[in-house]
Amino acid sequence: RWSPPPPRTSSALTTSKLPAAVAAQLEELDLYDPTTLARDDRQEVLGTAAVGALGLFLLPLFEVGLLGDVALSVLLGGGAASYVALRKDEVGDGARRLVGKTAVTAADKAREYEREQQLTAKSAAKAKEVASQAWAELKKSLE
């Protein structure tokens, strides 16, 4: 039977930073303790959780308003995806390596694109310009 290689553990942190009861529960469930994983592996677990939350958010399952939908998507979708990514078997390894690594790569590319294109700065400048024009027109109409 194939067994996935264990994730890298942080050389700076080999003992859990979680409360003992939580660490014991993770061990009982045969899940990795995310606080003992190396940075890259933690990022992959977080990427998997983000994909799970986003995937559930995009499905029209909840009729509880935007904030409720976000909260339920994060709790249910992100929680389920985190569970899968922390598993110590080939399913967990696949989730981390395939979904998590892809999400981390996509986020890195988005940050790189933002740095190159300065989209946030351009959007803020345009919003300020539109707001100034609207304010000027409002003042003019009130005169």
Image (cartoon, rainbow, N blue to C red):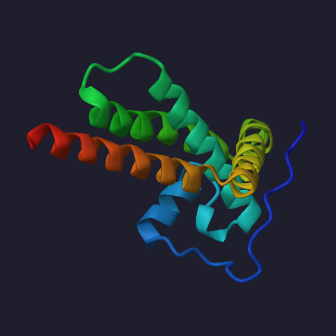
Residue for point 31% across, 31% down = 66
Q: Residue 113 in the image: state x and y as whole percent.
A: 74, 49
Q: Choose between 83 and 122: the one closer to the eye.
A: 122
Q: Is residue 63 left or right of residue 9?
A: left
Quarter the C terminus occupies: top left
Q: Choose between 137 and 12: the one closer to the eye.
A: 137
Q: Residue furthest left?
A: 143
Q: Residue 17 in the image: state x and y as whole percent.
A: 53, 75
Q: Residue furthest top?
A: 60
> Residue 137, relative to residue 40: is it above or below?
above
Q: Choose between 137 and 66: the one closer to the eye.
A: 137
Q: Is residue 78 left or right of residue 92?
A: left
Q: Quadrant of residue 84?
A: top right
Quarter the N terminus occupies: top right
Total numbered circles:
0
> Residue 114, relative to residue 23: is it above or below?
above
Q: Quadrant of residue 41?
A: bottom right
Residue for point 64% across, 42% down = 48
Q: Is residue 56 left or right of residue 94?
A: left
Q: Residue 87 in the image: state x and y as whole percent.
A: 66, 45
Q: Residue furthest bottom?
A: 12
Q: Residue 74 in the image: state x and y as whole percent.
A: 43, 40
Q: Quadrant of residue 76?
A: top left
